[in-house]
Image: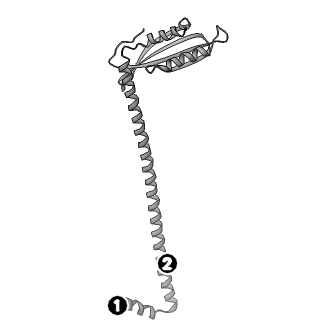
Amino acid sequence: MILFEYIQNFIDRLEERRFYQYLAITSSTIVVLIISMLIYYYKSVHSLQRQIETINEQRELIRRLVNKYEQVKKQREAVDITLTEGKGFKLGGYFNSLLSSLNLIDRRASRDEHAHTDPTSSYREIILKTKLAGLNMKELCELLNEVAQNPQVYTKELEITQSKKMPKTIDVTLAIATLEPKVVSSISTE
């Protein structure tokens, strides 16, 4: 109460010009304080919004990684089941019988089979690369369809060129592959 009386007496004793100077200084100070508080508030809000966006992006990335991990886990389980069911599967023998059933055995120009081992994987990839000459598109499609029907085999590489020896036919370089557990140490050729 004494403070308010002191302020009131101080204001009453001021000249009018001096009063307006003090009023302007006080008003300016209050405006600067309010503007400073608003700037601080909006900077804080903007910073928090950026943090929320970053967290949401990271959360989305983690969600995608978890989904991908689940897919890989399911694929690994499916591969394990397929490998367990198909023990003794020989890629070379399978491909020979496939070519025989499609009457394409005489079209094979060359064949190369090798294994590829990834140190981080528990599987070995057996790759059979073969060249077939003088095919038509129907025969190629039937061959690729039959390969796709077998869950143990997948197409790794396909190169199609127009045959230089026989008109209206194509030459195909086809690489198919299968997986086998690393514990198996020999490459099967039949």
- Residue 38 lies, with reference to residue 172, above or below; the image says below
Q: CA distance from mark 2 to mark 1?
A: 26 Å
Q: In the shown orientation, is residue 95 left or right of residue 123? A: right
In-front residue for pair 35/63 = 63
Which quadrant does the N terminus fall into?
Answer: bottom left
Q: In the shown orientation, is residue 57 left or right of residue 102? A: left
The x and y percentages for residue 111 are 49, 10
In-front residue for pair 70/41 = 70
The circle on residue 2 is 1
In-front residue for pair 172/11 = 172
Which quadrant does the C terminus fall into?
Answer: top left
- In the picture as drawn, the residue positioned furthest to the left comes out as 183
What colour scheme was applied to this rendering of the protein?
A: one colour
Residues at badges 2 and 1 in contact (C-beta under 8 Å)?
A: no
- Residue 21 lies, with reference to residue 120, above or below; the image says below
Mark 2 neighbour class, 10 Å CA radius: few under 14, some 14 to 19, many 20 or more: few
Q: Residue at x 36, y 88 (%)?
A: 3
Please state which amino acid type lies under the numbered disc 2: Ser
The circle on residue 28 is 2
